[in-house]
Image (spheres, rainbow, N blue to C red):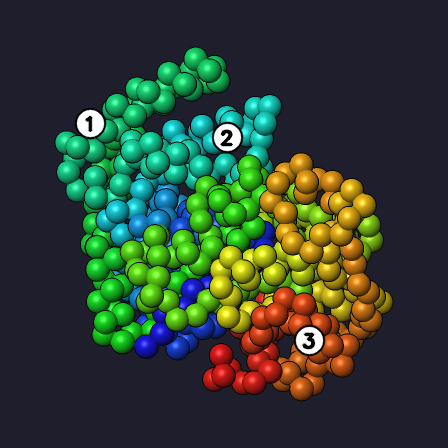
Amino acid sequence: MAVRVVVGAQWGDEGKGKLVDILSRNVDVVARYQGGANAGHTIEIGDKKYVLHLIPSGIFHEHCVAVIGNGVVIDPVALMEEMRFLEEQGISLKGRLKISHNAHLIMPYHRLLDSLVEQGHTPIGTTGRGIGPAYYDKAARIGIRIVDLLDHDILESRIRQNIKDKNRIISRIYDAEELDVEHIIEEYKRFDDMIDSYVTDTAHYLNDGIRAGKDILCEGAQGALLDIDHGTYPYVTSSSPVSGGATIGLGIAPTAIDSVIGVMKAYTTRVGLGPFPTELSDAVGEHLLTKGNEYGSTTGRRRRCGWFDAVAMRYSAMLNGISSCGMTKLDVLSGLEELKICVGYEYDGKTKDHFQTNLRTLERLKPVYETFPGWEEDISAIREWKHLPDAVRNYIATVEEMIDVRIACASVGPERTQILFPEGEAAW
């Protein structure tokens, strides 16, 4: 029995979906613990590419049960589209998908308010999927949960009250068109009929599984540097992607977690606004963007690219208690004559070796780099660790030493087969 947490160790988009898919070959349950349809976890199997936003990435293994935990905010439209898509691909969800009755719903007014705020004077760079406003209502204790769908009288009463209040904001502050309450009530009643058989008390289900000795993988969305408490506030997500978020978002005890697996790119990317010390606006940045196909799987937005930041990664390892790491997109570095790793920051003439979360400080930091030899070889066809060029293995070893975390695997392409294990997959 093992309970492991998979976390994004940078600013999201690290390739968590691929690694969760690989690890799911040997687990019983994969459980998503936070975020919403702003996530985009991509899995490539043969010539097919799948992008999941809400359903855990282990769903492609028939033996694996997928759990959407109470910490996730669920957009009914996005969930139904995803369920239909998977069924059309021949992937059965019956008995394999379980949705927490305590998960909160994203309502049409959440999506609208999210987009209206982003059009204002102080945008954050969100996906516009209503995630922040849904978590806002959750904290304000006016949110609507999956369990509320079961009683149509309660559901209708809460939707009417919320839309009455939200329409005042929508029309009077943003001068936008008010929402149709009757249409929304009927829409969410229909949603109840569609998902009723998948709804359960997932906290009890997971804890029963732990007691029964099942192997459970907890899947986070976004990345640790976007954490609402520990990230680059206010340019953060609205939940806790760090490993501790798994206990709250799934209802399992911290003592149940055996290990934490971090996922990081061989370089660094960030989408949306916010500080990014190692960002590159030169030919190397363009190389990473183009060769890495760095466009958001959820929004299609261009990602900002930069060198690997060992300082930020050490901070992430500390926050999450990362016991081992997977490095992704190593192949993207092929063709670069030299590689740089950020080993510290220069600030007001002094060198800092700790990651800073204060926005004003971050905006004034200058990265301090160490330079290493690159490699010309195309490594995407390599299938054994020992066949990697010396420069590649040296780069991995250097990163491993700098962040003080074992790198247990590295991917050299997007497909399932393009992942290498230095000690064999069984050692993972």
Estimate the x, y position of residue 199 in percent, counting from the top left.
23, 52
Disc on the earlier residue, 2 or 1: 2
Estimate the x, y position of residue 296 in percent, counting from the top left.
58, 49
Type of amino acid under label 2:
Ser
Type of amino acid under label 1:
Ser
Disc on the earlier residue, 2 or 3: 2
Q: Which residue is mark 1?
A: 157
Relative to residue 142, is residue 395 depicted above or below? below
What element does badge 1 sit on? helix
**Foreground residue, 39 or 252?**
252
Relative to residue 378, is residue 340 depicted above or below? above
The Cα–Cα distance between marks 2 and 1, rounded to whole angstroms, is 26 Å
What element does badge 3 sit on? helix
Type of amino acid under label 3:
Ala
Residue in the picture at 66% in, 57% down: 311
* Circle nearer the viewer, 2 or 3: 3
Residue in the picture at 39% in, 71% down: 258
Q: Which residue is mark 2?
A: 115
What element does badge 2 sit on? helix
Query: Alpha-carbon neighbours of circle 3 within 10 Å: few (<14), some, or many (≥20)?
Result: few
User: Would residue 92 be seen by someone viewing this image from the given angle?
Assistant: no
Estimate the x, y position of residue 266 in percent, counting from the top left.
67, 64
> In this image, 31 relative to 38: left or right?
left
Residue in the picture at 36% in, 19% down: 167
Query: Alpha-carbon neighbours of circle 1 within 10 Å: few (<14), some, or many (≥20)?
Result: few
Relative to residue 359, is residue 288 depicted above or below? below
**Foreground residue, 351 or 233?**
351
Residue in the picture at 41% in, 56% down: 244
Q: Which residue is mark 3?
A: 397
The N terminus appears in which quarter of the rendering? Answer: bottom left
Do residues under tags 2 and 3 come within 8 Å of each other at their CB atoms? Answer: no
